[in-house]
Amino acid sequence: MTATILVIEDEPAIQALLSLNLQRAGYQVHCAASLRQAQASIGHARPDLILLDWMLPDGSGLRLARQLRSQARTRDIPLIMLTARSSEQDIVAGLEAGADDYVGKPFSVRELLARVRSLLRRRMPQLSQDITQAGPLRLDPQILSASSHGQVLPLGPTEFRLLHFLATHAGRVYNRAQLLDQVWGEHTTVEERTVDVHVRRLRKALAPAGLQDTIQTIRGAGYRFVLPARL
Ligand code: CA
């Protein structure tokens, strides 16, 4: 499960430097050179993290940061501001607009990559390659395998990603559009009822281990993962 990173930067040399190094580090990279391009890219597929330049040709990165934070679909996207402005006042403005972190230009690529990794680990646990244990359920993202008490569950890759996302966000309710964004990576070309189909398959695969009720339907809201108290 590779993280997709959107680089919003209008200076071609810096955009190329970031894109190259992020790709080398194993990320999938999309680039935008303006607010408009960025909005189109995010509208098409929700990135797992955004690197956002402050000064863009058609406006300020702060404006986009505020916009992202004001919409349910983009509110949780980890965001690092990237800029030559580094006065305390600017840093505060960036953080208040919703940035999670702040890197001043010129930046060290190694430091930037470390911050990207750390933010993804903190905010996007479903992208981790570490094994997740949820009650009797053991999820190994490296081989897309789920098991319970040593019994391997027959999950397809999409069912695995769906289960892994919900289990690493246990208790939280996600609607179909959010699940398409988070698990499928886009919400424009896949129909929402696809989610229901995969939830049904997932429950069926969990049933032999008696875990089908861990995926709950919340009427009018979506789905969530909950471990029954008796397990
Ligand atoms: Ca710029």
Image: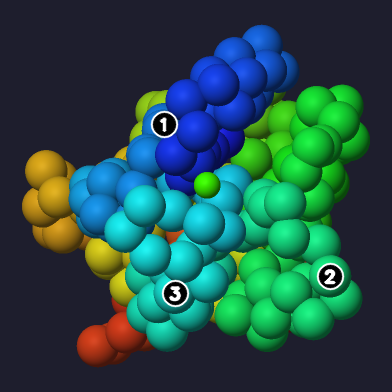
Q: Position of residue 88 (x, y in %)?
A: 87, 76
Which quadrant holds the N terminus? top right
Q: Residues within 10 Å of mark 2 (few under 14, many from 20)?
A: few
Q: Residue at x 27, y 64 (%)?
A: 177
Residue 209 seen: no
- Discs 2, 3 touching: Cβ within 8 Å: no
67 over 37 or under it: above or below? below
Cα distance between the residues tagged 3 and 1: 20 Å
- What residue does disc 2 label? 87
Q: Earlier in the sequence, mark 1 or mark 2?
A: 1
Residue at disc 3, CB closer than 8 Å to ligand 1: no
- What residue does disc 1 label? 30
Viewer-nearest of discs 2 and 3: 2
Q: Earlier in the sequence, mark 2 or mark 3?
A: 3
Q: Residues within 10 Å of mark 1 (few under 14, many from 20)?
A: some
Instruction: Name the residue at the bottom extreme.
Output: 220
Amino acid beneath label 3: Arg
In the image shown, does 177 or 149 lie closer to the viewer? 177
Q: Earlier in the sequence, mark 3 or mark 1?
A: 1
Left or right position of 201 against 115: left
Q: Position of residue 143 (x, y in %)?
A: 63, 18
- What residue does disc 3 label? 63
Q: Residue at x 37, y 39 (%)?
A: 32
Amino acid beneath label 1: His
Amino acid beneath label 2: Ser
Which quadrant holds the C terminus? bottom right
Q: Secondary structure at mark 1?
A: strand
Residue 215 seen: yes
